[in-house]
Image: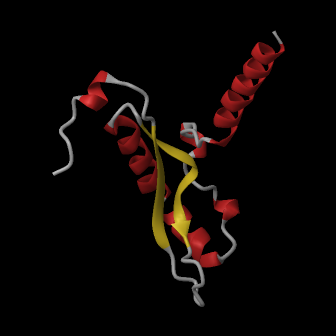
Amino acid sequence: MRHGLVRFIVRRLAVLAIILFIPLPAAADDAIMSVDQYKTAKARTLATTHQGQLKQVREDIYHCMPWVGVQKSGIGFRQPKGAAEDDRYLSIWIVIDQDEDARFSALPGPR
C-alpha cells in the first residue's frame, strides 16, 4: 500500500515538473519583446520602427503550422553575448509541440 502511494506521488511530481519547466507558446501579445525590455536607445528604436513587421512575423508563425508557437518575448532584437558594441540581430525563439498529431507525422522526413 505504501509503495503505491509513493509511486503516485512521484508520478504527480514528475508531471508537475514537466508542466513547470517546458516552455509553452506565448499568447499573441506576449510573443514580441516589449519596448521597455530593451536597455539601449538603438534597440528601442529598432523595436518601435519594426513593430508592424514583428507583428506580421508573429502572425505568419501562428498560421504556419498548428504545432509551432513563439516563446514569451521570443521575437525581438537581441545582442550577441560578449559583444562589445550594440550590434543587434532579429531573434525568434519558437516552441514546437511534439504531441502525437496525424498532420505532424504525415510530413516527409528530413531531406
Of residue 55 and residue 20, the one placed in the foreground of this image is 20
At x 52% / y 82%, what residue is drawn? 87
Q: With respect to residue 53, does 28 lie above or below?
A: above
- What colour scheme governs how the chains and residues are painted in the rendered image of this protein? secondary structure
**Which residue extends farthest bottom?**
84
Q: With respect to residue 48, does 56 lie above or below?
A: above
At x 74% / y 29%, what residue is drawn? 13
Give the total of numbered labels.
Answer: 0
Q: Quadrant of residue 42?
A: bottom right
Position of residue 106 in the picture relative to residue 20 (left or right) = left
Q: With respect to residue 86, does 11 lie above or below?
A: above
Of residue 61 and residue 3, the one placed in the foreground of this image is 3
Of residue 11 and residue 78, the one placed in the foreground of this image is 11
Percent across and percent down for residue 97 are 45, 35
At x 55% / y 69%, what residue is drawn? 78
Quarter of the picture containing the N terminus is top right
At x 74% / y 18%, what residue is drawn? 8
Position of residue 67 in the picture relative to residue 84 (left or right) = left
